[in-house]
Image (cartoon, rainbow, N blue to C red):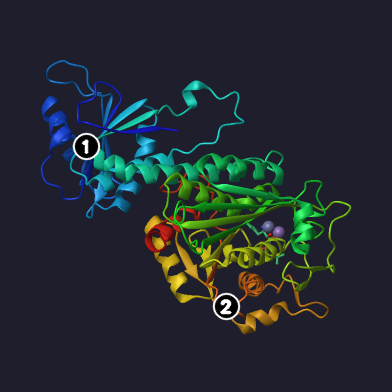
Amino acid sequence: MIDIAFVKPALPRHGALVLPIGEGAEAFTGLAQAIDAATGGAVQRALTAAGFKGRKGQSCTIWAPALADGAAGPARIVSIGLGKEVTAEAAEAAGGALYGLIQAEREAVVAAEALPPPVAAALGMGLLLRSYRFDRYRTTEKEEDKPKLERLSIATDAASAAKAAWAPLRAVADGVFLARDLVTEPPNILNPLEMAERCRALESLGLTVEIMGPKELKKLGMGAILGVAQGSAQEPRMVVMQWNGASKGKKGTAQRPVAFIGKGVTFDTGGISIKPAAGMEDMKWDMAGAGAVIGLMAALAGRKAKVDAVGLVGLVENMPGGNAQRPGDVVTTASGQTVEVINTDAEGRLVLADVLHYCQTRFAPRFMVDLATLTGAIIIALGHEHAGLFSNDDELAGRIMAAGKAVGEACWRMPLGEAYDKQIKSEIADMKNVGGRPGGSISAAQFIQRFVDTKAGPMPWAHLDIAGTAWSGKDLATSPKGATAFGLRLLDRLVAEHYEG
Ligand code: BES
Ligand code: MN
Ligand code: ZN
């Protein structure tokens, strides 16, 4: 991971010097002014010649300029545009774009004297998130093909304020990297057992981690998750992670926690309703909801969030083994409700059914948010630009929409309703696990909602269908091609804005 430091301004003698420049920004100050003077005005001349105006997405690189005094100077000076409004969001995006422009240098200094400390920190965050790379299984890559950047020094006169702004961002970045690692790991390595062990490792951050296997799941009556697991040689696990950042050390009653639930299908073949071969390898990503929840819990603990939070993940492999469940099977869920399994490929909702019920009955949380790569239909509806948001609570939904917007994880609210719920009526059981192709993401959400109990009082719940956003086929502003950790930053922001203190 790139080392990010906040330092006193000084002109670098090698590597990259980065000049973040807002649109219509006044004359150069600080290091920008110093390098322009030292190069005899070459920087200003180059920017004019290149038509650089500081617009969003603009950049201009000057290679190895001679310094007037003959001293060694930076190998490249990279100006990047921040746009008209120099916000944290703009700086984060610029930081992401900056990574590609300087990754071939070992070191870089950012002239951030004119930026407010949180904006300077956001630039570092964008760069760090964009630099993510998973190379555990590359053994023959040539040295010259690897990115070089090791250290980004952010030059500021307010180093202590910038460091304070940076600390929580760094914890969130660690969580994002953890989630992306989990999602990217191949499915022969990251089976339910291994994934549970990676949760256990988070005890070092102060999280309480409980791992439950088939015996405990049976005792809890979790026939739905067990039904999915029975076609695989790998045992299922349910992991409960707790972070007590609000009640720690305090006397009296604990706060009701906020709760996050993740679908963790470590590989989804479809089971007996088996998927076609083409592209099936992508189904290693079917645990991205759980990955985001695990990364989120790591982030909350890492930044010592003042909240009581629980994260629960249902970890299971969906395989068509000799003992696999059949289309037509009826399973009894932990809630007592029965489900006719029409299609064994609609397994995520079965996993969530048991975990949601367990979460609500054990913790009586303030709200529950689940994340799942649940339906191909949400990709048909929303593409890869928005996650589908389903909720029984307008306030919670509004907060999630706003948090998503703020961190670049956009959601689009989808409807719920009785007419959709009818789609999952069964002839033989309380419900069936598929509702047909029309509105496939919605009937899936209806299914999940049946395991949120509002008979005794309200239980705010939201479901994020992240099938289209958990990974990306192209580089995004702060996420290279591949696993995005979608939902993690959104929920971290949701907690920070509304549920801390
Ligand atoms: N994991 C898939 C959903 C999925 C599909 C995620 C494509 C990412 C990309 C899920 O378990 C699934 O198979 N859903 C089925 C449901 C259907 C059988 C009702 C689907 O979407 O086809
Ligand atoms: Mn499936
Ligand atoms: Zn699935």
Mark 2 falls on what kind of element? loop
Which residue occupies the foreground of this view, 169 or 359? 359
114 on left or right of 291: left
The correct choice, above or below, for 238 with respect to 117 in the image is below
Q: Is residue 466 above or below residue 461?
A: above
Q: Where is ligand 1, by quadrant?
A: bottom right
Query: Does residue 381 appear to the left or right of 403 in the view shown?
Result: right
Report x, y in % for residue 472: 53, 50
Instruction: Tell me the SS state at disc 1.
Output: loop
**Residue at position x 75%, y 74% in the image:** 337
> x, y (%) of residue 244?
49, 53
Question: Is residue 425 among the parts visible in the rendering?
Answer: yes
Figure quadrant of the N terminus: top left
Circle on res. 416: 2
Q: Quadrant of the C terminus?
A: bottom left
Identify the disc placed on residue 156: 1
Residue lying at 19% horizontally and 35% vertically, measured from the top left:
46
Q: Is mark 1 within 8 Å of ligand 1?
A: no
Please tell me which residue lies in front, 275 or 328: 328
Q: Amino acid at mark 1?
A: Thr
User: Tag 2: Cα neighbours inside 10 Å, few (<14), some, or many (≥20)?
Assistant: some
Q: Earlier in the sequence, mark 2 or mark 1?
A: 1
Q: How far apart are labels 2 and 1 at the CA level? A: 50 Å
